[in-house]
Amino acid sequence: MKKLLITVSLLAGIAVYAGGFRVSLQGVKQLAMAHTSAHADDASVAFFNPAGISFIPAKFSIVAGGFAVQTKVNYQNRENLGNYNTNNPLGTPIYAAVAYKPVDNFSLGFSFTTPFGSTIDWGSDWAGKELVHKMSLKSFFFQPMVSVKLAPWVSLGASYIYAKGQVDWTRSITQLGGTMNIKDTEAKGHGFTMGFYFRPDEKLDLSVAYRSPVDMKAEKGIATFNVSPTLYPRLGLDSQGKDKFKATLPLVEEYTLAASYQLTPQWKVSADFNYTLWSQYNRLIVDFENAVVGNQIADPTLSITPKNFQNTKTLRVGTEYHFNHKIAGRAGWYFDESPYSNNWFIPETPSFNMNVVTAGLGLKFGNLGIDLAGAMAFAKHRVFNNTYYNFSGQAKLKAFYAGLGLSYNIK
Amino acid sequence: MVVSVILSSCKTDYDTDVATLVITSGEADFSNYVALGNSLTSGYRDDALFINAQEESYPNIIAQQMKRAGGGTFTQPLMLDNIGGFSNLNMMGKLTLKVVDGDLSPVPTPATSPFTPISGAFNNMGVPGAKSFHLLVEGYGNPDLHEIGSRRSNPYFARFASSPLTSVLKDAMAKKPTFFSLWIGNNDVLSYATSGGVGMDRTGNLDPRTYGYEDITDPQVLKASIKGVLDGLKAVDATKGVIANIPNVENIPFFTTIPTNYLTPYVLGKKNQAQGEVMIDQLNQSLYGVLNQVLTQLGHGDRIKPLSKTKANPFLMKDETLEDLSNQISVALSPVLGVQTARVFGMIFGQARQTKEGDLILLTTKNDIGKQPDKQQYPYAQQPLNAYGITFPLQDKHVLIPSEITAIKNATTAYNTHIKQLADDYGLAFVDANAKMKSLSQNSGIQFDGVRYTTSFATGGAFSLDAVHLTGRGYAVIANEFIHAINVRYQSTLPKVNPNKYSGIQFP
């Protein structure tokens, strides 16, 4: 087996996505085809549907890959002529998976992905500084899985999700003349995925998959307040200006219905429908241990902020054409909905309705596959007014993605 | 082609980029904008006038926006430093927050620069301390230190007055403004209010030359004064401008920060709860209980009640509108305390009561609580009857009582009726500053981009450390109101500002 080079850093942050902070980049081959998922060519199907690993045409398959995500968000305000751009770092989601089929109707697999994340950097002196300067959310999903062929044409698979996460969020406290940061590097959560994968004939693949919600619990959070030390006692902070906090972020559940069809032996078309239950994220609760910086009259150490996210639908259409047995070309388009309406726009997770156009190449050298993908987002600009904060204006997004993935199958 | 179809159906770009917006002056001409008013107009805050504060005055903020629509240079009579005050006139510099006895307190800075006249015809003619009629007084800016000392002249105007005998209006007319703002009348009622109502309500007296500085101006005098200013400006073709009305005193933290019920055991015991409870028992036994008994016998038991150990207690204060029971108290207590002591009790508590809802306690009263009253003024304030608010009543200057508040409210309402009428009569833009202050003083205040502004002292963001004048942010909020009114009246498109970009209270 050839050695795979994984030199991308473990920075799983991605700036902005249509679906809140869900980062739909878990397979390079898939991205090239609008991130459709009814493809069981290698272990990369493990994340999308554990049942798919039963249909990998190899006894052993291993994949790894990463993406570069470049995003820029602009904010403008027609009333006071404010105009600001983010300076987001390059996002680098990564993935790796392995699948092993000891006997024909039983497969084992393991998937490592970063399916939720967000890094936004507006700087410290912009219009929305009281809401966010810089925020970084990261998640790492470790999923062991099994899949069983119930019949030659259908399999059932399930995985356990062990998730680790990090949050690092800095914002201003303008009336106290300073800033605050909340950080937890050891958030944890659990969940599961399950699915059915069907191959009723050799032309058609159908995938039905479900990922449960993963409630990421931050129990060891530290809040640091950068304000005058004379304010520490009044705010309930320790002598370093810090306090502990707890918070939970729901990495919400998702249903996927996918299909792929070989129009000709060389030419495959695919379509996916995702339904993501963002409505579970209706508010963010941050519970400080002692700091009286919350907003609840009954308990001033408790901060409850309404988010009012809504469930979203994503429609994906992709295609793959094998020019010869060494090279395949791919293309796709998908439409992604934003999980919130204009009066719930939040600059720490800017989100837009967007059309994304994708393309890519697949190269095969014996057992080794090299995949390349690129995508460009066309996001509809937003005219928003979040009355909860009295924060209004207009926002627009530019986003580009590129991916490089490797696969190795042993029959 | 596919890409362009997707692009056009997507509207990725804004309809209009802010960089391309054209700002217009509409029917107005902003080339020479002159601002008239008092301390609020000059940028005064933290109880002083100083450079950084002046740079964040609302007229300067408005003028920067006017620059995009033909506005000219906006000059201000800048002070010499960032401390303010006048070292040779016994006028202190700005308040800053310092830790005093373990608490953050505003402390004045000694002035380092003397009163120094400067020359020039300035666009910002705001004069701290000016009342409505002062704008017409000739000699109001006389730099002679004797005139200043006797308060016939105001050093803040004397600094930049064109001559010793000119008036603010005359200098404004000489500048030939193309546009003006006028916010005056606050001091006509505020000087009475911030002195605790020790002055007189001059309603009915049409001669301001007879007024003391701490008196309430007759509303007709205010109306005639403002009309005089507007007529003077009209005479030099300055017919376009904006005028603002007066906020209510109960929306200003200077009057609403100290509650009427303030004396908890913790406070009385000087941060020692147990000691405070002991003190309350002693006070009830030796003073409050005695007074309550006597007053009850005289049919006025509701004036003073014993102190509670579980709730915050009111202050003792003197209410000059109450029937004077000095003699009766004296007579009733003689058998118990002896003639001498009973007489002292009578004198001190003859018109005393506890503060109650409806009273307003001045912020500056906090410095006097528990302190020894001036022995020259109150020779009978002897141990143990010598702790202001606790064993010796707060005096007229410390508290605004309902009758005083009514006088203030009536004057404010009358002033505002006249100001609105004049705005309409002269076709000017009008700012309802009264309404804005009301919304700011609601519990939830006003938010801008997630930053909450309330009228709370020090943490509210809008008011500076003197609790009467605004912070840079507060002045920016007011500037936006002026800009909005100007745009409505004159069809201009002046952009507003983001209040959060301006300075607030500095914590040490």
Image (cartoon, coloured by chain):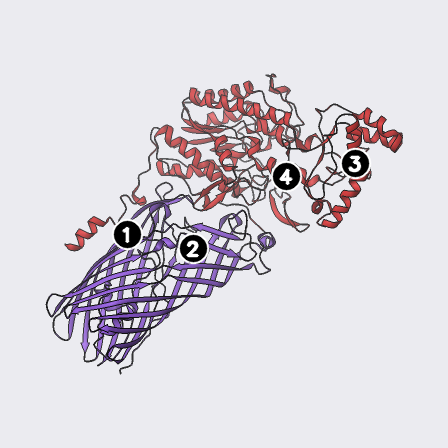
Report the amino acid beneath label 2: His
Give the number of the mark in front: 1 or 4.
Answer: 1
Tell me, yes or no, if residue B29 can be seen here.
no
Secondary structure found at label 1: loop
Report the amino acid beneath label 1: Asn
Residue at (51% x, 49% y) in the render: A295
Which badge, 1 or 2, is on the more N-terminal residue? 2
Give the number of the mark in front: 1 or 2.
Answer: 1
Residue A88 lies, in percent from the top left, at 36, 59
Q: In which quarter of the image is residue B325?
A: top right
Chain A painted colour: purple
Report the amino acid beneath label 3: Gly
Name the side, left or right, on which B278 lies relative to B431. right
Residue pushed farthest bottom?
Answer: A1
Residue B185 lies, in percent from the top left, at 54, 27
Q: Mark 3 lies on which chain?
A: B
Secondary structure found at label 2: loop
Residue A106 lies, in percent from the top left, at 27, 77
Give the number of the mark in front: 4 or 2.
Answer: 4
Mark 3 and mark 4 on one chain: yes
Colour red belongs to chain: B
Tags 2 and 3 in contact by the CB under 8 Å rule?
no
Which of the pair A50/A5 is nearer the observer? Answer: A50
Task: Please give the label number shown on residue A353.
Answer: 1
Location of mark 3 (residue) = B289
Location of mark 4 (residue) = B258
Q: In which quarter of the image is the N terminus of chain B?
A: bottom left
Residue density around tag 4, few if under 14, some if 14–19, many if 20 or more, within 10 Å: some
Location of mark 2 (residue) = A133
